[in-house]
Amino acid sequence: MSNSTSAYSLPFSSNTRGGFFKLIGLLLVAIGLLGMLVAAFGAEAVSPVLTGLGGIVSLSIGGILYIWEARSQKSVAEQNNGAWQNNMTARGASAWVVGVVLTGFYVLLYWYPDTLRGLTMAVEPISQWLRNRPADHWFLYGTFYTLAVMIMGVHALLKYRNSRYHIIRTISVIFFQLGFAFLLPGLLMLFNQPEFYFSYFWPLKYDYLFPGTVGYLVDNGAALGVFMVFWGAILSFAATPVLTYFWGKRWYCSWVCGCGGLAETAGDPYRHLSDKSKKAWQWEVAIIYPVFGFIIITTLILWINSWSEGRLLGNLSHGFSSTYGFFIGAIFSGVVGVGFYPIMGNRVWCRFGCPMAAYLGLLQKHFSRFRITTNGGQCISCGNCSTYCEMGIDVRHYAQQGEPIIRSSCVGCGICAHVCPRGVLKLENGPRDNRYAATPLIKRSDVNILS
Amino acid sequence: MQAAQHLVIIGNGVAGVTLAQHVRAKSTCRITLVSAESATHFSRPALMYVYMGHMRYKDILPYPDWYWSKNNLNQLHDKVTSVNFETKTLTLQKGEPVQYDVLVLATGSCPAFYNWPGQNLKGVQGLVTLQDLQSMEDNTKDIKEAVVVGGGLIGIEMAEMLRSRGIAVTMLVRELHYWYSVLPKQEAILVSDIIRKHGINLIFEDELASINPDAQGGVESITTKRGKQLTCQFVGIATGVKPNVSFLNNSGLNIDKGILVDEAFATNQPDVYAIGDCAQFNNPAPLAPAVEQLWYTARQHGETLAQTLTGTRQKYDRGPWFNSAKFLDIEYQTYGYVPATWDEKYGSLYWEHTAGYKAIRFLFEQDSGLLTGINLLGIRYRHDLCHHWLKQQYTIHQVMQELPAVNFDPEFFQHYEQELFIQYAAQFPAQATPPTKSNWWQLRKKFGLFSSSESC
């Protein structure tokens, strides 16, 4: 916990005090949105840099101003007030509007990028400055993505401000998004090197170990390209098991990964929307492992094909990888994964689709020191942990029996431990002996055996 | 319980449900839970989070629908109007009468009202049941001011709930500080300060005299015993709870405050038991109250009685006391015995953060050094280790050796056990050797502080 006393210097209220700055913030957001709209549709009439980039700046400043006012006037315990009552976070009309806008944006981005030309021109100066080349729709997307992580990162920092774990973790995801997934790839291009994301690995960034990409990196990046291939392979096959052994899946999913970064920041207000039912868990298992299997098979086939110079499998492997790219890469991770945040929660992709999560999850479940410990017999079965679990884990099921929570899907965000009103849960790494053993302070009834 | 027998439990709170689960684990007998309050079990301490919008009602149900049918636990949503102990029959308000072989009363508590003038006005209520939550929703619609009477755990819950809707709240507390009947002075002052900083108005050393009506039969204001008049449209009564047993009066059951039971929860009627808040021990253990009104003890009652009903008569032994709560954003844990005041037979170590939102207290016997209890505010300790210390009768000196292992705060949090140790060393310069580098996982293994059954 931070030593700052500022959190306690003012009487808190859920009323709209500090309304003035909130209003200014909202005004700037509205002007920003208007500017971006003009850039999108009126690029011929007015400079899209002026309206679009100006709009993005106005939206960012206004957003931060509003978030700052709204979140800091509430104490830490008040941050979830109204989560299930507010239209925006309880699948109300405004949530559907946001969902449709986000989904629509992904559809345009993947299949109709020309429609985004106005906005793409708006970020042209940033692209020129960073990468010394024209902006494209992917650069626009990267800019929006990084801004979302940063602005909503401020939101998360304020919401969880009494917890060092969440402060450090949030700064970490902002750092990796801004540095490793935005600035560094841009700088690589500035120096005429291949664009490369050092924070993404196979099997999430599946093509990094495809023969085509490997060949391209080695041919175009020379020594650096070789290093990139080496880096990717080491991270996937050596660093991932070792780091997961010591700290669980969380080192990646809620500290480094860009998808996780967006989920933990922009997606945080929607975390309670994840489905906690047994049915959802069955779907999860039925989808995520086949996706992982599919990516392994695709990678193997591509390599076999490459070594046999296409004689063995011909065009089949290309079909495999482009099928994956369309259904999983585009539709699943983008359109559904982010577009449906306000309806299905913020980790739909991570939970049901991500092959990296499947890989890390298997390691976490069977080969890790990580667990969430339940503190003796202190659970009051209130359900805050389960409700706010973005991965849809019924945390309470374990906690009320005094058992540790060891689930392959757990990304270790730590919010269950934060929202627990009795401080019953702790994310920790410990010896693997008796890792599943429960507290002796509750008698477990094991009633399920009877079925 | 034989397979053909029928166990009927009145009440589906944590006591009744725990009992049902543990009997089911060992017996295939018929089990029926009857509740007038709700169709299924919900977490009572979580009601406040539904009002505040953190959760929906369905989120505070600890077990999904399929759980009950899968485990063959029948649930009856009906009110028991009377019990005939001769014929072993329950009369229900809606349904057919129910025959039992064994009856367990787990009817819980209801708010204690003390005959204040105006206590039946609309807008005056306690907070115990699901129905209370619903009426609080209705009674607080579009109101501006509220008074909460009583400085205890339900009082602060109600105040926090009302603040979440932007309603101005005054808490009327009989003692000099918040919860001063339970918390030592320093802890009580710390918590009182936190409450005030959250914009809740606290009035100490005053009590409710009367509730004054408005023209529509609602609340206009209250008058205190010291003659203060406070304008409000809602009065939350949080002056304690009492066993919910009135429907059993004159039924032949021995009742004092609660249903009188022996140390294995048997009442004076054959095959009738009582557990949870509604039970009152004939001969309570030393330092233990006759009526235990806690979630945790209710669960333990259920666990214990299940052993008796499945063949091994077991006396209730709650072991070292523990409890926890949350005052707005400050968590509270207590282990063992820490009363509000103590005499010179006891010694105390107390550390408080300079910013005033964290505190640790150890209480021990001055002569023997025996640890009696621990209070924590804003800091989490490991229940299993604290329990072990109390159960094994550690002295404060032994405790200090294992102190580094006890913290349960999240990773990266600052630890303050070192500061507590400095105080200890000042009080006991002769005994103070620096703690061994004890680590929770080593102690857990050494003392076997985990359950051998792995159900995963």
Image (cartoon, helix red, strand yellow):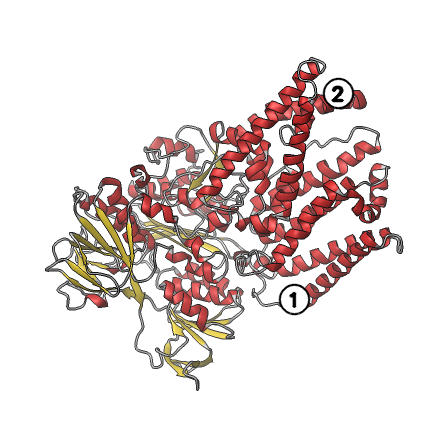
Closest to the observer, B290 or A134: A134
Using the numbered discs, state the Cα–Cα distance from disc 2 to disc 1 in whole angstroms.
57 Å
Image quadrant containing the N terminus of chain B: top left
User: Label 1's element?
Assistant: loop
Toward which corner of the image does residue B402 lie, by quadrant? Answer: top left
* Residue located at (53% from left, 39% from top): A412
Which residue matches tag 1? A18
Alpha-carbon neighbours of circle 1 within 10 Å: few (<14), some, or many (≥20)?
A: few
As drawn, the label of residue B402 is none
- Mark 2 belongs to which subunit? A
Vertical position of residue B31 compared to residue B93: above or below: above
Considering only order in the chain, which callout, 1 or 2, is on the residue closer to the N terminus? Answer: 1
* Residue located at (62% from left, 55% from top): A96
Closest to the observer, B251 or B5: B5
Closest to the observer, B17 or A121: A121
Q: Amino acid at mark 1?
A: Gly
Residue B429 visible in rendering: no
**Residue A183 place in picture, x, y as percent:** 76, 38
Left or right of B259? Residue A60 is right
* Residue located at (69% from left, 24% from top): A318
**Residue A229 place in picture, x, y as percent:** 71, 23
In this figure, what is the number of numbered marks?
Answer: 2
**Residue A344 place in picture, x, y as percent:** 56, 48
Residue A325 visible in rendering: yes
Check the image and name the residue furthest to the left. B86
